[in-house]
Image (cartoon, helix red, strand yellow):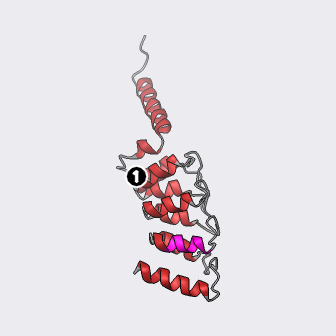
Amino acid sequence: MEDNAVAAANTLLDHGAKVNTADKLGSTALIYAAENGNDPLVRTLLQHGAEINVNPGDTALMAAAEGGRLQTVQTLLAHGADVNATGVNGWTALMYAACSGSIPCVQLLLKHGANIKPRTRGGKSIIELVRESDPSAKYIDMVDEHEAHRLKKERMLHFLKQQGPTE
């Protein structure tokens, strides 16, 4: 099926279709290909000049990261996708990957310099988003070891304060 999509895209593009045309939601063929993890189609669209960091809502990298599409995330990063771009709601690719539980995508995005500090438009951190999406998420520590360490210290301080004076 992927070969058919690539062949169809090549035919359309060779006959004048515009690679960066967006639908009513602002999504392009690249965003849909990334969302579906169709890496051959992503590569074809990029070869035909698809704009990788177009951001009317969310980017192709965000779509791939949310779906845990590791190969597509790798392809997009290799072609210059902005690892720290934010969508309409203020989410980043790292936030999407973490909330969907895609540890390999989280690791790859962090390796490529994803910033763990941004907050959503609603003011939530990535740690808060992950906890809301999966309260039992055991992979939270890998998202931000420093933040996790800080939270552990805060819990310990809170515990010690509850114990009363130690002298």
The quarter of the rendered structure image containing the N terminus is bottom left
Main secondary structure found in the magenta portion: helix
**Residue 76 image position (x, y, % from top left):** 54, 62
Residue depicted at x 55% and y 49%: 114
Residue closest to the eye, 159 or 9: 9
Query: In terms of depth relative to the viewer, which is nearer, 125 or 166?
Result: 125
**Image height of 27 relative to 120, above or below:** below
Magenta region: 41-48
Q: Which quadrant of the figure contains the C terminus?
A: top left
Viewer-nearest residue: 45 or 96: 45
Tell me the quarter of the picture where residue 153 sits: top left
Is residue 43 within the magenta segment?
yes
Q: Is 121 one of the magenta-colored residues?
A: no
Q: Answer above or below: position of 21 versus 128.
A: below
Q: What residue do we see at 60% from left, 84% from top?
A: 13
* Direction from residue 135 to residue 118 in the image, left or right: right
Question: What residue did someone put label 1 on?
Answer: 103
Residue furthest top as drawn: 167
Q: How many marks?
A: 1
Q: Amino acid at mark 1?
A: Ile
Q: Could you say where residue 15 lies in the image, as x and y percent from the top left? A: 62, 89
What residue lies at 50% left-to-right and 85% top-to-bottom? 8
Q: Position of residue 162 (x, y in %)?
A: 41, 26
Within 10 Å of disc 1 (Cα), the crowding (few <14, some 14-19, many 20+) is some
Horizontal relation, residue 107 to residue 19: left or right: left
Q: Quadrant of residue 48?
A: bottom right
Q: Indicate the secondary structure of the residue bearing disc 1.
A: helix
